[in-house]
Amino acid sequence: MLWNSLNQTVELGWDFYLPVILFVGLIAMAVPVWAAIGSAAIVMLIMSGDLPLSLVGESLFTGIDAFALTAVPLFILTGDVLVRTGLSRKFLDVAEALTCFTKGGFGSATVLVCGMFAAISGSDAAGAAAVGRMTINRLVESGYPRPYACALVAAGACTGILIPPSIAYIIIGLVLGISASTLFLAALIPGLAILVSILITNLIVNRIYHYEDGGMMTLGEWLANLGKALKSGWYAFIVPGIIFYGIFSGRLTPTEAGATAVVVTIIMGFILRTLTLADFPSMLVSSAKVNGVILPIIAFSAPLAEALAIMGVPQGFVASITSLTEDPYVLILLMIGILIAAGCVMETTPNIVILAPILKPLADNIGMNEIQFCIMMITALGVGFITPPLGLNLFVVSGITGESILKIAARAVPFVLTMLIVVLLIAYVPAVSTTLLPEIYQ
């Protein structure tokens, strides 16, 4: 039994519980998430009778008929082209030149290049795979244990959905009706805060265990080394420059920025002769596979969200939780706990489309800014990329190296703890996510 905002009883029977049990059971049997969501939605509509079953067919198309979603495959494709053209290695060269004077220099460079890659692709898994192939063996050669090297890459790649442009912010903006450009601007400081927290954690761990000793050099030597790296790879930064300037200046929408980035990256690949027409089929297929995982989830979530709304589940959830406590600090902790738990067992996209409409009324009820709520939600879900049992980034780096997932997860614990600190800052200090926004959003 739940209570809605009008204090009227909302009876939840088997028309709610059976679809939920079905969804959990299908996920446990490794059925694709979109199929589990679609099955639950259909069963819920049939059993409740609140909405016609024909709604499913209509919602499948209207749910993804959004111009903003066009940006998703474009950013995915840009990241793929970036790797194939070798431009991602230029990022690594510059990052290594920036950090080579410190202890743990190459470890820090690995985290930085994860952030640079995130500023283009918007995908965690893509960043973990691309950066992992470039850096893990070199990290081991530098003195890092292989499980820790894997954990470092997995943690750094979490910035993929946290540093704009991010596919996750495009999706939550679509679900909640918020401008993706506004969310990108709000996410800039929190995303960089996560990146810095991972950098600091690695420096502390490295200082304790002495994995890697940085080479001593004078300021002049460091500047000369950095200048050399920039001279040979400055053009790689044209792509993130276009994306950031276009979106944050308001001259380009995220979709337009993604399209421009794809074209520019392809042209640069042809100029550098690292890309040929023969590469296009495999690039397009690879990007289509990733996009093909995301869009069906969004499509099948639309009828489920409408069924839940007509049954009063979001409002009932708010009243049920607030009946336990009205302390906003406790309620925020509860939301964070729910998000982290969900992130541990399910991917970001289904978590967004299912939980965002349910949790946002609770955030509204305690007076949380909707932009702050979105940033908190995505950042909390991002922690799930390096926490078992799902831990997508853990699986990616494990697949690359053959290292045990449990060993990698154990070495990722310090990064999880520091990321949680940033999540709490975002949740309790609105300025972290609203400082860069126009006054109307603050």
Image (spheres, helix red, strand yellow):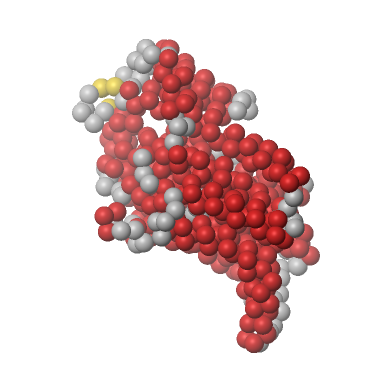
In the displayed structure, would residue 43 be above or below residue 356? above
Q: Residue at position x 63%, y 66% from top? A: 235
Direction from residue 105 to residue 352 in the image, left or right: left
Q: Residue at position x 52%, y 20% from top? A: 39
Q: Residue 48 occupies which quadrant of the picture?
A: top left
Q: Residue at position x 38%, y 46% from top? A: 179
The outermost residue toward the left is 6
> Between 357 and 326, which is closer to the camera in this rendering?
357
> Between 28 and 187, which is closer to the camera in this rendering?
187
In the displayed structure, would residue 178 be above or below residue 47? below
Quadrant the C terminus occupies: bottom left
Quadrant the N terminus occupies: top left
Expressed as whole percent of the image width and height from the top left, the position of residue 157 reads 60, 54
Q: Residue 391 occupies which quadrant of the picture?
A: top right
In the displayed structure, would residue 98 be above or below residue 216? above
Expressed as whole percent of the image width and height from the top left, the position of residue 138 reads 76, 63
Direction from residue 328 to residue 100 in the image, left or right: right
**Residue 369 seen:** yes
Expressed as whole percent of the image width and height from the top left, the position of residue 268 reads 66, 58
> Between 195 and 74, which is closer to the camera in this rendering?
74
Direction from residue 377 to residue 229 in the image, left or right: right
**Residue 131 seen:** no
